[in-house]
Amino acid sequence: MSNIDEIKVCELEAKANEIRQSIIEMLCEAGSGHTAGPLGMTDIFTAFYFHILKHNPKDPLWEDRDRLILSNGHIVPVRYATMAHAGYFSLEEAMTLRKFGSRIQGHPEIEKIPALETTSGPLGSGLGQAAGIAYGARMDGKKFRTYCLMSDAEHQAGNLWESAMFAGVNKLSNITGVIDRNNIQINGMTEDVMPLEPLREKYEAFGWHVIDVDGHNIEAFCDAVEESKAIYEKPTLIIAHTIPGKGIAGIEFDYTWHGKSPKTGEAEKFLQELRTLKGKITCGDKE
Amino acid sequence: MINKDLQLAANIFDIEKLEQASTRDGFGKGVVEAGKEDERVVVLCADLAESTRAHWFKDAFPARYIEIGVAEQNLATVASGLANYGKIPFITSYAAFSPGRNNEQIRTTISLSNLPVKICGMHAGVSVGPDGATHQQLEDIALMRVQPNMTVIYPCDVEEARKATIASAKNDVPTYLRFARSNTPIFTTKETPFEIGKAELVWKEENPHATIIACGPLLYKALEAAKELSEEGVSLLVLNNHTIKPMDIDAVLRCAKESGAVVTVEEHQVHGGMGSRVAEILSERYPVPIEFIGVHDQFGQSGTPEELIEHYGMGVSAIKQAVKKVITRKKR
């Protein structure tokens, strides 16, 4: 029994497609930035901002909002695009990504946009911040959840495991971590550069409840988040298996698209592909 | 002469009778007082509860004491999250490890994020003694003072350390507080004024030949040097420059203008420390000869605090020599 109905899933899938188009447009206009990660995480960001999070774009610092922490700040174009679609700021402003004088910085900064929750970019530090927020909230009996989105390769950083240990031993069950398990990093495939597996067993050994899920199956992802809310004794980690560059067949799983943006001609092709997809991805296609 | 307005210890030069304590004790007392005043104050510890005096807070407020273990990067990032949520976190470790090890986490998640985390670096300087160079943090002021948004304070004795800790709980900005392990003279009192960013003249004489600008426990040695020099006919000003950032520019300029020469004194590398900041200010606005007392581009070694202070040229005789030298460099 799912926690989300089919019509809602269809709406979210259509929204995700629109957001992917915005990401391509933003990156093309910026002339630099990361492409693969944002496209791979679009379904999950859509699910968060349009279904999972308790939030209010008109009152972004509402005290009891859920906190969404983005640890791997380099995929922030997907967050900007999703937040623009959710009404935090205009799509026009989102298009100023990486431009001089813009609030839409190359990596997220709370001093520029407090609704981003944290400043990030240097990897491995988001889970510690999420743990600090969750710990403080629990001290005060606050009921909101803290979500922490992380990349897979940032699990090569020691700071992250210090935080995983801290959250586990303190039973911070008000945290749901999400790993974007897309298997790529700048120098190649994660298992070639510096292997991460077995990720599930590592987190379990650190005292976490772990769920594996298809990161493009919005229904399954939302259900995993619901499951995490029911786990009382442990923080929960969702390993979201995603396809880097998802939605653009020619760049899916191509690690060379980790850290670059599409040029004008490429962007037109990508947008054409996404527009053609529109209407093709339906609930029925998942069967 | 000692500046009477500051109500310093009555027996300030009676070293036999003057009480001694470490500035870390001032932190320990101050953070408990801050915790009583404001329940948002929390203390994070990285497996050094006793030597940082964090255990005094743990005894008083066990629910607001957070153990991190030997993980200084996480010490900074968890504190950033707590401050982000609305707490006032004090993070405690040896300065060699915090901010020594976790500099990037402090830069991104505290300074750039502009969150009011209080970084308490203990056992700073060579005076930690027998532990040797690995634990003798001499670069922390340099690391912290170059970060935008960061306030940097280096108290001179246990009482000023207590006041600085309490004041930092209220300043609502990222703050680095530097403390020492060894016992040093307690020469300020409860009545001595303390304000972040306001340097105080602790020694004033008519027609001064030079100014000693000092911070941390070596300020006491600066005073001893001033007293001896006064007896030799050399008049001085001595400035307690406890706030390295934002520095009291007006006070530094007034001293330079009045005396025409400056000696800076700190238990830190002369590169990038308090003295460097004084030099930046004066070279831009009112150039005068400066001599720098501190460690000159070296690491420390094992020894007693007194042996090390003498060896690295930070004792009373070295300060006196520097004063005499800087006076000879003044334009006639």
Image (cartoon, grey):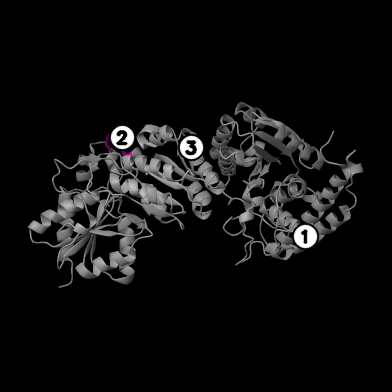
Q: Quadrant of residue A133?
A: top right
For the point 64% across and 37% down, the residue is A174
> Residue B295's x, y, as percent?
27, 49
Same chain for the residues at labels 1 and 2, yes or no?
A: no
Q: Secondary structure at mark 1?
A: helix
Residue placed under numbered mark 2 in the picture: B131
In this orientation, which residue lies closer to the viewer: B211 or B50? B50
Residue placed under numbered mark 1 in the picture: A267
CA separation, marks 1 and 2?
60 Å
Residues at marks 1 and 2 touching, judged by CB atoms closer than 8 Å: no
Q: Quadrant of residue B97?
A: top left
Does any portion of residue B155 appear in the rendered image? yes
CA separation, marks 3 and 1?
52 Å
Q: Amino acid at mark 1?
A: Ala
Q: Callout 3: 10 Å neighbours few (<14), some, many (20+)?
A: some
Specify the farthest residue to the right: A284
CA separation, marks 3 and 2?
31 Å
Residue placed under numbered mark 3 in the picture: B64
Q: Callout 1: 10 Å neighbours few (<14), some, many (20+)?
A: some
